Image (cartoon, rainbow, N blue to C red):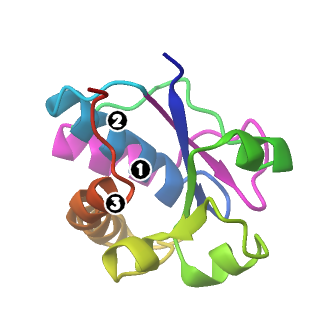
């Protein structure tokens, strides 16, 4: 059975989208849900950049696993075409996809945009992670993420 791909998108793919990727992977593991491949990308990512130290730190604090070898990548049209869902961190980011039917945003799924903590202190990253975690049940429900029957 083919895995459905879900891609989280932010600006640089070093803060918000890798945290959202890690949170959803953790949530699906806890719920024993398979058949999904979760990843992330950025609209203006510098390919090969590592996840921000603050993002790594707050994920570790929360006990959420992430890939230490994580590297940023830029979203491509092929990635969008191959995805079950592309989830942008903000409404504005979603607008850049010109109405692609498989592109949505955290606001559409959970009623909240995820502000960019880039360049801010560790508390901003904690708040960002908390907001992502708070929104994830709505993301799972609205994207109908569940095991195959």
Q: Which of marks 3 and 2 is nearer the N terminus?
A: 2
Residue 61, compared with residue 38, is above or below; it is below
Image location (x, y in percent) of residue 100: 72, 66
Q: Which of marks 1 and 3 is nearer the N terminus?
A: 1
What segment carries the magenta color?
A: 36-63
Residue 114 seen in this snapshot: no
Image location (x, y in percent) of residue 73: 73, 42
Q: Name the residue under label 2.
A: 25
Circle 1 crowding by C-alpha within 10 Å: few under 14, some 14–19, many from 20: many
Instruction: Please identify, in this view, whether the residue under mark 1 or under mark 2 is nearer the observer.
Output: 2
Q: Name the residue under label 3.
A: 139
Q: Does the magenta stretch include residue 69?
A: no
Instruction: Please identify, in this view, whether the residue under mark 3 or under mark 2 is nearer the observer.
Output: 3
Left or right relative to 6: residue 108: left
Q: Are marks 1 and 3 in contact (CB under 8 Å)?
A: no
Q: What element carries label 2?
A: helix
């Amino acid at each position: 059975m083919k895995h459905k791909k879900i891609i989280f998108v932010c600006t640089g793919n070093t803060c918000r989208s890798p945290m959202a990727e890690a949170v959803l992977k953790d949530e699906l593991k806890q719920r024993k849900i398979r058949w999904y491949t979760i990843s992330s990308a950025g609209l203006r990512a510098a390919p090969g950049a590592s996840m921000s130290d603050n993002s790594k730190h707050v994920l570790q604090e929360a006990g959420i696993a992430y890939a230490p070898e994580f590297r940023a990548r830029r979203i491509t049209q092929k990635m969008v075409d191959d995805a079950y869902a592309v989830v942008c961190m903000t409404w504005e980011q979603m607008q850049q996809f010109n109405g692609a039917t498989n592109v949505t945003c955290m606001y559409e799924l959970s009623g909240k945009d995820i502000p960019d903590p880039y360049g801010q202190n560790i508390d901003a990253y904690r708040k960002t992670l908390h907001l992502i975690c708070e929104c994830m049940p709505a993301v799972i429900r609205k994207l109908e993420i569940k095991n195959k029957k």
